[in-house]
Image (cartoon, rainbow, N blue to C red):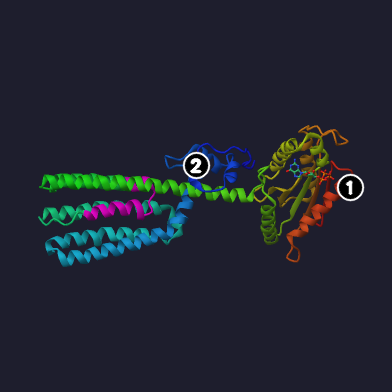
Amino acid sequence: MYPMLRSGIVPDGVRQDMLHINPELLSNSSQSAYGRAFEQGYRGLRFEGALEQEFQRFYLSTHLVRLRWAGFLAITLFGLFVLVDVFTLPLYVSQWTASIRLGLIIPAFGVGLWISYRSEWHHHLQLSVFIAALITGLGTVGVIAVALAQNYPIPYEGILLVALFIYFIACLQWWRALLANLVTVLAFVIMEALCQTDPSQRLYQIIFMFTANAVGATGSYFLEYSTRTTFLVHALLNELAERDGLTGLYNRRTLNNHLDKVWRQAIRDGRQLALAMIDVDYFKRYNDHYGHAEGDRVLRQVADVIAGQARRPLDLAARYGGEEFALVWYQPTASELAPMGEQLREAIADLCLPHAGSETGRLSVSIGIALLRPSGEQHAETLLRAADTALYEAKQAGRDRVVVVGTI
Ligand SMILES: Nc1nc2c(ncn2[C@@H]2O[C@H](COP(=O)(O)OP(=O)(O)OP(=O)(O)O)[C@@H](O)[C@H]2O)c(=O)[nH]1
């Protein structure tokens, strides 16, 4: 069954004023996975199940370029620090600090960068950047420790910059950035306890380290929260753009795009394609008799039945317009089409919806089905026209029936 987008309830958790999008778009969304995520909230920076995996892919694709820039920036800056070390520190200090930067930190970012260019390794990208962040944090603590141990204190502000880099530039997800920084803070506190001889300096530096982390953790939390919001809004808008607001089925534009796609696929595979056009009989009379709201309710019920008939990956159920629906069946056999159409017609009749304006006294549909083996000379429009002709024949023959036409 398709996710339905039609409950018409504005999700409670949605701050439309913050999202700056048309409230009408969100009002139809609470039945979709994205709408539900809005409803449930994501303060723990995690979505449920498959949605989280989808977010991870979105996060990767939207952060890949930034992440590469961050990698190049880190390598360049740490390369410059090596030069500064060599020119400003005595050799007995710089040989250690430069070794840590050149031997650990720069290679760690190099590995991350390399992975960013290997799409088959992308699922390890966050882990590799996390390891690089950890090495950078601990390495920088090591640099300060070496300098202190040699009685040559170097400016410790660098470790604060590293913390902010990990929180805001490394493109790590919040919990990874937090973990890398917490481990660094722990190492920093231990290092200060062991190597720092001036108690006031020790206190001062630890307080600043905690402050920088409080600022960084808070900022990066909100950053990821808003990335998640962007992801949901983006997905919701895409979903709403391709679905019909009343029934939740795909809309006509999506049907046309899908038909073009499966048409080409069927040519490649040498398969046949069927299209069923389904029209509710005497629906004008239904509306006139029961009212438009009741008509809407019935259209949704019919749509639910039709949605259940699109079972294969390349099948698709759509609302073609008004009280007309379409079903694409990929690779059916000619002999099964009439039974499939009959089954659908009967399933709708089995809803037992009373229809005072119909001779049968209950709501029925007419179905026209066309079957084609697509070829390069024709166009997907051919199938639509053929199904429309079959539907017209079904109507002409008295409605509440199935007509199959085919050129196979
Ligand atoms: N309730 C409701 N009615 C709709 C909707 N879209 C179209 N309709 C109505 O569907 C009716 C279609 O009427 P017709 O095209 O004359 O078709 P029909 O009455 O079903 O006649 P046949 O198809 O020949 O059996 C019109 O009254 C439209 O107003 C909708 O979203 N909701």
What secondary structure is found at the residue carrying circle 2? loop
From the image, tell me which residue sits under label 2.
15
**Disc number placed over residue 211 in the picture, else none:** none
What secondary structure is found at the residue carrying circle 1? helix
Region of the chain picked out in magenta, as a range: 157-178
Q: Quadrant of the N terminus?
A: top right
Task: Give the CA distance from mark 1 to mark 2.
Answer: 52 Å
Q: Is residue 139 left or right of residue 280?
A: left
Asked if residue 212 lies in the magenta stretch, the reply is: no
For ligand 1, the image quadrant comes to top right
**Disc number placed over residue 396 in the picture, else none:** 1
Q: Is residue 254 visible?
A: yes
Q: Amino acid at mark 2?
A: Arg
Crowdedness of circle 2 by 10 Å Cα count: few (<14), some, many (20+)?
few
Q: Quadrant for residue 371, please give it.
A: bottom right
- The x, y position of residue 234, in whole percent, is 53, 51
- The x, y position of residue 340, in whole percent, is 77, 43
Crowdedness of circle 1 by 10 Å Cα count: few (<14), some, many (20+)?
few
